[in-house]
Amino acid sequence: MSIFATMDMKWINRIDRYVVALGVISLVVAFLTHFPELISLFDRSGQNDLFPGMHWADVANEILFTFIALLLLFVLNTVLFKFGWSTGYITWWKLLLSFVLTWIASNLLGQGFVFLHHRFDIPAIDAMVHHYLHPLRDFIITCIVVGSCYMSYLLRRSQLVLLENQQLRTENLVNQYEALKSQLNPHMLFNSLNTLRSLIRETPDKAQDYLQELSRVLRYTLQENESQCVTLGEEMEFVRAYIFLLKMRYEDNLSFDIRADAGTESSQLPPMSVQLLIENAVKHNEISNRHPLTIYIQAEGNCLTVRNSLQPKLTASTGTRIGLANLAKRYQLLFKQEIVVREENDTFIVTIPLI
């Protein structure tokens, strides 16, 4: 279903709720405004001084007319002043004009019902006190109609503000996530090109193979990094290709121990998460004949752990150190979960959740 169809459905549902609310209010008010007459109908004393000669049909017609009149008054305010619409702003002068027009329309509708009563002998209440109550009822009905419409307008405005705030928060999260991804791609590309440059200078015969594998890795990076999540199986296929590039440079000085429990391949995680942890270990540790580095990767249960011995380079790394911070932010934005980074017994350990 397209976003426009979804918006149309929401708008239709909102209109339906508005119409139902107006119908319920009209029905309740129609009964309440004739509550004295209804009480008089149950008077068992036989002395109905306020409404002499009144019958059930008279009261039923009065209630029905009031109900229809209320609906018409609500329609009048909705059409003229757009109380139930998603656009428009209700000023105080519009509210005052609505009150005046509703009071006039209520009075005219009442006079129209009296005319129909006398012209076509429609059952109605003829008691004098009932006619005296008409101006008061018109005022009460006007207050209820205008007040209900304005309360509906305020409620709609508050819901609109909440919806806009939610959309802004969502857009902000998306923008933050996209910004993080834009930082990750250049970060990996920069390090890979540095490696390629070294290979061209040191071992030109390996540079062509390295470039071919690098293009495959970068193709995966561009494709999968458009997704928010990938399966662990997909990520590990990419990691193995990335490991091939690393071993072209470091040969036997860099080794990997990869273990994954059965069933973890379908677990999900942000794309390039494991690659980032490997890159972080390679960048910040010495890798040489005297100090070979082994990176352990273990997927178990609902988490994946990458660990390596701490053997810092003699020269400080020139990296911007955004990798782990970006990964932590991505997990927070996507899953509201944290990654765990710790050092134990000269071992650097990073644990990330599997979703």
Image (cartoon, rainbow, N blue to C red):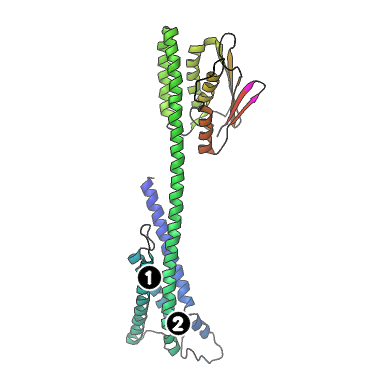
Disc marking residue 182? none
Find the magenta span and give its range.
343-347
Are there few (<14), some (14-19), or many (20+) residues within 10 Å of tag 2?
Answer: many
Asked if residue 133 lies left or right of residue 312, the reply is left
- In depth, the one of 184 and 263 nearer the eye is 184
Give the residue drawn at x 52%, y 19%. 317
Residue 261 appears anywhere in the view: no
- In depth, the one of 123 and 327 nearer the eye is 327
Q: Is residue 269 magenta?
A: no
Label 2: which secondary element: helix
State whether the magenta stretch is mostly helix, strand or loop: strand
Return the x and y of residue 151 as percentages of the image width and height.
45, 64
Return the x and y of residue 242 as percentages of the image width and height.
48, 19
- Amino acid type assigned to the residue bearing label 2 in the image: Val
Q: Is residue 346 magenta?
A: yes
Residue pointed to by mark 1: 96
Badge nearest the viewer, 2 or 1 = 1
Disc marking residue 59? 2
The tag earlier along the polypeptide, 2 or 1, is: 2
Return the x and y of residue 193 as percentages of the image width and height.
42, 17
Return the x and y of residue 70 as percentages of the image width and height.
40, 73
